[in-house]
Image (tube, rainbow, N blue to C red):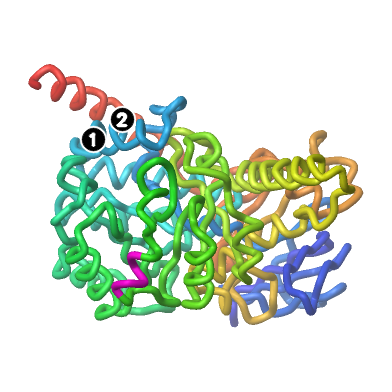
Amino acid sequence: MPDRILLRGGHILTMDPTLGEIPEGDILIEDDRIAAVDRHIDADAEVVDASGRIVIPGFVDTHRHTWEAAIRGCAPNATLDDYFVEVLDTFAPVYRPEDVYASNLAGSLECLNAGITTLVDWSHINNTPEHPDAAVRGLQEAGIRAQYAYGSANLALADYWFESKIVIPKDDVRRVRDTYFSSSDGLLTMAVATRGPGFCVDDVVKAEWEMARELGLPITVHVGMGRLAGRFGMIKMLDAMNMLGSDTTYIHCCYFSDEEWQLVADSGGTISIAPQVEVQMGHGWPPVVKSMEYGLRPSLSIDVVTTVPGDMFTQMRSAFGVERVRALAAFWERNEPAEGLLTAAQMLEMATLNGAHVVGLEDRIGSLTPGRQADIVLIDTNAINVTPVHDAVTAVTLCADVSNVESVLVAGKFRKRDGKLLADVGRARGLVENSRDHLLSAVAARKQAA
């Protein structure tokens, strides 16, 4: 007999174009999957009252450096140039495996608390072979769905980011894949987080791309952002090396030529945009509308909690606001009425269905479709910042915040229920606070010794 949960009487935003919106309906969960979605379902199951709740698919964060949870808020005023020095050349070299574990555990629980059920963990902190093991263990223990993206070490800025000649170690990538990711059906999958052209010499770029493809792993890379990478013309460089492909996610993309946008679209690549970081740290304008003009489906991501909040509500609103102000300013200059602006519904689609598309899991997650994984979030509409609800999509995208995320299920299991994480939050907090203290001490010791 399968484990069955019946979510009863919620306002369901399925994100499935066939099923649409059900103002009052039920969802039947059997084990890890959605068995049925309808206006009324009778079933022998544990009944959960979802009345007064908006039910949505879990948010998908398509790019986060989760290992930085232990140094949350350390660089509030940083530009991207500052970040390389203040984080990658200061804290990263003294990170121990236990600091990565603590950060990935606490950072994943932070995601779940905020309704993010799927995470791309962009892990460029593999200073020893023990570091990726620690990162994966943190993800596993949190119970989140995640794509672990194996990145470089970060022992010295000059060695790893200034035309680096150091290749991500293929043998260790294979070891991690074979140890933890022998099946593609589990909560955790794997990718390669590469630095790309401009940051690495061409031979390193080719070696990492070829390694990922030989090992059957998707690729994720930062491109077209800020003072440095915005001038590299990274997509044109990759095209010249015959490296573009549908297996690659391009992050930020703020400074692309039209030619580069077309190259990404023609190759079938996918897009991750981190709007709050991009406007705050100087990566450039979040290219949500621009990507859509080329038929791409942009997803949203958090990037770094060293500098911005770690929730998807912030990202939806940031992208919504900056893209609309840019468009509205253009209409004002032309003295024309505004039309074709981004909508709140499009933002929710980016945070759910588009995210699933980008991580290659659209057949499993991203919508509340029967047969898909039961990654589900319940938003409390009784809270004073949400009630009264005129439009459920607006309530989620423009009214709700993390405090309204009442319950979260991943693969049919509650990870948060009735407003509380079902995890040892005190332990996770203690671990990450201890890591903070160690890291601050280690950084001070390095400065004193220099």
Q: Is residue 187 above or below residue 72?
A: below
**Looking at numbered disc 2 in the image, what kind of residue is underneath it?**
Glu
The mark found on residue 366 in the picture is: none
Q: Residue at x 31, y 65 (%)?
A: 192
Say which of 204 and 219 sits in front.
204
Say which of 321 and 368 sits in front.
321
Say which of 154 and 412 sits in front.
154
Q: Is residue 18 magenta?
A: no
Residue 370: x percent and y percent? 69, 79
Check the image and name the residue furthest to the left: 449
Q: CA distance from mark 2 to mark 1?
A: 6 Å
Asked whether, in this view, residue 150 is left or right of residue 47, the answer is: left
Judging by the rendered image, the residue that carries numbered circle 1 is 89
Numbered-mark total: 2
Q: Residue at x 71, y 54 (%)?
A: 378
Q: Which residues are magenta?
A: 237-241
Judging by the rendered image, the residue that carries numbered circle 2 is 86
Q: Residue at x 14, y 51 (%)?
A: 128
Quarter of the rendering occupied by the N terminus: bottom right
